[in-house]
Image: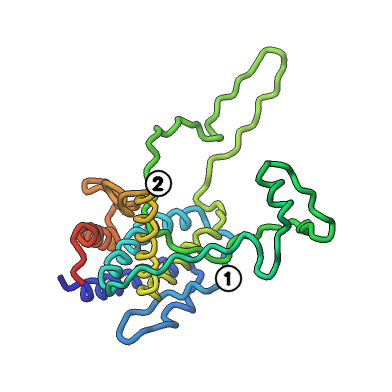
Amino acid sequence: MDWHGLIEGNEAALKRVLAALVAMTGLGQSAIGSRQSGSSPPTADCRLPIAATLPRRLHRAVLRLLRPTESAVRRLIILAAKTLPKTPPQPEPVPPPACPVGTRQNPATAVLRSLGIAVVVPPTSAPKRSVPVVRRPAASIALPLADPLRNPDPRPRTVPPHAAPRILSFDGAVPHRLPPPPSPTDRLDATRLVLRLRALAAALDDLPRQARRFVRWQALRARARAQGAWRRISPLRGGRPPGQIRANGRRPEHEIHEILRDLSFFARRALDSPDTS
């Protein structure tokens, strides 16, 4: 199986789809094509200021294509991990000693602690109280290596706020004014959307690094399963991949759906076939 040719062709197609998504948002029109590698198509440069808001219609349109693009890149990483040479597992890190190097613990303190008796820490050696740090929004995120799992619980039935029932009484109550229905021109927060576009651009720019990351993820999962912990059997979700449309659905099919369909087939084949490297 020519994994390298398969990876190069789909990588170029995914870069083209990502450039189209960035152009749809209008955030990187001047940055598209700034980074090129050989004869590969231009890559969307997502290292740009995070947009505050986007219209609801545009936000939903980009998100509708972003989900299958993320699924396709995850499957491309699995194929790239198939081409890595077989390396021996890295040695486990040595746990730090309980007592710092160069210090000696008082024997009486050790005996009291073994009996469950609290030991008063002198004021000189007591740790200083740290000042609470205000958490800032993440400046970057990494592409998840596994598909999100389906929620087995049924989706609860909800009523949108603009269609909620209004219960009136005969004691002169004033009818409550319901909010207007959402409009396609409403402005939605685009911070998370741009972060996900950046994660896709970073993954496609350095695919071997993402492949090594996936190999480490597999090693950690196998080690945890060997110790009796519950872990996922496969990084791929059963059934249709996230973002893939139905074969007989009414939604029009995009180029990314065909790419995702092909990559899903080859990714499952790469996971099921033994390593022959």
Give x and y (percent) for residue 187: 56, 54
Q: Give the residue at mark 1.
A: 49
Residue located farthest toward the right when viewing the structure as drawn: 123
Which of the two residues, 132 or 221, is positioned nearer the viewer here? 221
Under tag 2, what secondary structure?
loop
- Going 40% across and 39% down the picture, which residue do you hit? 151
Q: Nearer the viewer, mark 1 or mark 2?
A: 2
Under tag 1, what secondary structure?
loop
Seen in the picture, residue 216 relative to 147 is either above or below; the reply is: below
Q: Confirm whether residue 24 shows in the render.
A: no
| Residue type marked 1 | Pro
Seen in the picture, residue 27 relative to 176 is either above or below; the reply is: below
Q: CA distance from mark 1 to mark 2?
A: 41 Å
- Going 55% across and 25% down the picture, which residue do you hit? 165
- Going 73% across and 52% down the picture, which residue do you hit? 109
Give x and y (percent) for residue 252: 28, 53
Give x and y (percent) for residue 71: 34, 58
For label 2, the crowd category at 10 Å Cα-Cα, with few meaning under 14, some 14 to 19 and many 20 or more, is few
Residue 168 is labelled as none
Give x and y (percent) for residue 72: 32, 61
Q: Confirm whether residue 64 shows in the render.
A: yes
| Residue type marked 2 | Ala
Which of the two residues, 211 or 247, is positioned nearer the viewer here? 211
For label 1, the crowd category at 10 Å Cα-Cα, with few meaning under 14, some 14 to 19 and many 20 or more, is few
Residue 229 is labelled as 2
Which of the two residues, 173 or 237, is positioned nearer the viewer here? 237
